[in-house]
Amino acid sequence: MAQANSPQTAPRLLDKDGLGSLIATLQDKGYQVVGPRLGDDAVVYDLIDTVADLPAGWGAEQAGGHYRLRRRDDGALFGYGLAPQGWKRQLYPPRQKLFAARRDETGFAVEPPPPPAPPLALIGARACELAAIARQAKVFGDRDFADPGYQRRLAEAFIVAVQCGEAEATCFCASMGTGPEVKAGFDLKLVEVLVQDHPAYVAAAGTPRGARLLEGLKTEQAGAAEIQAAEQALANAGRQGRKLDAAAARALSANPEHAR
């Protein structure tokens, strides 16, 4: 996982085919590419093979206890807001084979563990999700009870973050300082904008390996219009109707044994 951003170069511009090349390049490098796709009447995070697997033209209505897919009037691939599931299922699978044993004439013989799964490439992580991943990394990195599987999967993961372009009714990351701008924890960051009614992506690298991968793709320098559109998308995502009192949250954290 990216820990800190590398020195930024001028933002690059990817079109939809360029995004497809990004996915193919990650696969060629041996990554299992996981991203948003439609499933079970929702946007879910699952293995994707090509850019065609992404939820083009789909958004979502979200409110307290309510989630429903809706058609957008554009071809945005990441216009669904926040998916109802997070990335923990990928980084900390609910079912893991810890060991296997077989009975023989002398008792039980423990079989060697299976080889580790290929590294993950996560496509579409949002700022609040990256904040959650960072918090989970602290929990699963406890000095006395660290989870080596989680730490390995996170360390090997290539993260392509996508900055939100609009706020949902349930969003409150701005009040917590965990979004909507993606600032850290990524290898590549994308901001989806419309260029002549087609989605395009203002891309920036966050780590040296992200920069190397971006250099190998067919891109062009993002123009003033695309950069302005990306800034406007961030402003739109910051218009959130919900707010959490950060001072109250800190008080809760400081008093875990309080009777109330």
Image: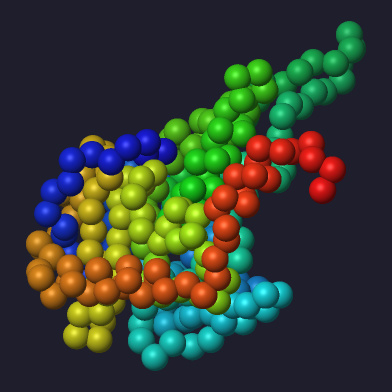
**Where in the figure is residue 155, as x and y percent of width and height?**
45, 33
Residue 118 visible? The answer is no
Identify the residue at horizontal 17%, vertical 46% (top origin): 8
Residue 108 visible? The answer is yes
Front residue of 52/237: it is 237
Q: Quadrant of the N terminus?
A: top left
217 horizontally vs 157: left or right:
left
Residue 83 drawn above or below residue 65: above
**Where in the figure is residue 250, as x and y percent of width and height?**
60, 45
Number of labels in the image equals 0
- Residue 79 lies in what quarter of the image? bottom left
33 horizontally vs 223: left or right:
right
Identify the residue at horizontal 32%, vertical 45% (top origin): 187
Colour scheme in use: rainbow
Front residue of 201/31: it is 201
Residue 120 drawn above or below residue 152: below
Front residue of 225/248: it is 248
**Where in the figure is residue 245, as x and y percent of width and height?**
57, 58
Identify the residue at horizontal 61%, vertical 66% (top origin): 84
**Where in the figure is residue 3, as x and y percent of width and height?**
37, 36
Front residue of 155/16: it is 155
Residue 46 drawn above or below residue 7: below
Q: Residue furthest bottom?
A: 73
Identify the residue at horizontal 10%, vertical 69% (top origin): 223
